[in-house]
Image (cartoon, grey):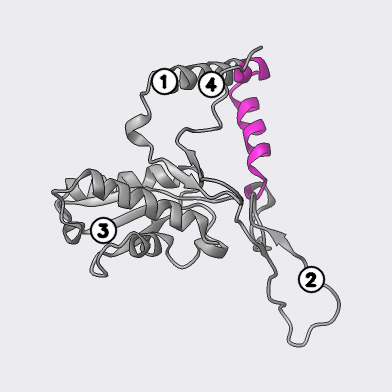
Amino acid sequence: ASHHKAAKAHAIRELLARTPDLDPARIEDVYLGNANGAGEENRNVARMAALLAGLPTSVPGVTVNRLCASGLEAVIQAARAIAVGDAHITLAGGVESMTRAPYVLPKNDRPFPTGHTDLYSTTLGWRMVNPRMDPQWTIPLGESAELIADKHNISREQQDEYALASHHKAAKAQAGGLFDREITPVPVPQRKGDPVILAADESVRPDTSR
């Protein structure tokens, strides 16, 4: 059921297949960004993905968390390691499955508690917040976006225009095959018949309009 680790392992295996001259044992570290870090993504998902991909056990892995910039931060750290001479070959990227984000039940502060406790979804936002944290730092992402828009006087119309242009640019690039070398087709098993091959980002909507 650990679909995201398997998916990242699939991508790593394909990368190695595309670079047959590279001995996997020469990879000095695997950097993967991951924002959630709960459920199947816990306990260093970078290391787990590397092992599932068949990399030697001598290749370490480190999971990086800078929330929405986690994957980018992983690439930066891997590049920095090469730039300063700490490594010659690194593997970097990101992995996330919000679909598989678990519900969590925190431990009670008291032994043998009675009554009820809270159940948290780890899909989005803060959970199990330290009571010493200022409430302004634990607002959800959507509310943060609204505050930033107000601060910088970014209107809803401007945001919509930006989103529209983004979809159109992505659709044009997708149609032109600009993403093809970056994508590893993934077979999705079906209850009946052959697997469906997922080979394109389904979130791009070319029919987006005003």
Residues at marks 1 and 4, CA–CA distance in whole angstroms? 10 Å
Residue 190 to residue 38: above or below = above
The residue beneath circle 3 is: 29
| Number of numbered discs visible in the structure rendering | 4
Looking at the rendered image, the disc whose residue lies closer to the viewer, 2 or 1, is 1
Of mark 1 and mark 4, the one earlier in the sequence is: 4
Residue 154 in sight from this viewpoint: no
Per the model, the C-alpha gap separating discs 2 and 1 is: 49 Å
Judge left or right: residue 204 versus residue 103: left
Label 2 or label 4, whichever lies nearer to me, is: 4
CA–CA distance between discs 2 and 4?
A: 43 Å
Instruction: Decide whether the magenta segment is chiefly helix, strand or loop.
Output: helix
**Residue 4 to residue 116: above or below:** above
Crowding at label 3, few (<14), some or many (≥20) Cα neighbours within 10 Å? Answer: many
Q: Residue at x 35, y 35 (%)?
A: 182
Residue behind mark 4: 167
Residue 207 horizontal side relative to residue 33, left or right: right
- Sooner in the amino-acid sequence: mark 1 or mark 3: 3
Asked whether residue 140 is drawn in magenta, I would say yes
Marks 3 and 4 in Cβ contact (< 8 Å): no
Helix or strand or loop: what does disc 3 sit on? strand
Q: Secondary structure at mark 1?
A: helix
Q: Amino acid at mark 4?
A: His
Q: Nearer the viewer, residue 124 or 10?
A: 10
Query: The magenta stretch spans which residues?
Result: 137-160
Find disc 2 in the rendering and name its residue: 117
Mark 1: amino acid: Ala
Task: State the residue position of label 1.
Answer: 173
Which secondary structure, mark 2?
loop
- x and y percent of residue 120 in the render? 71, 61
Residue furthest toward the right?
115
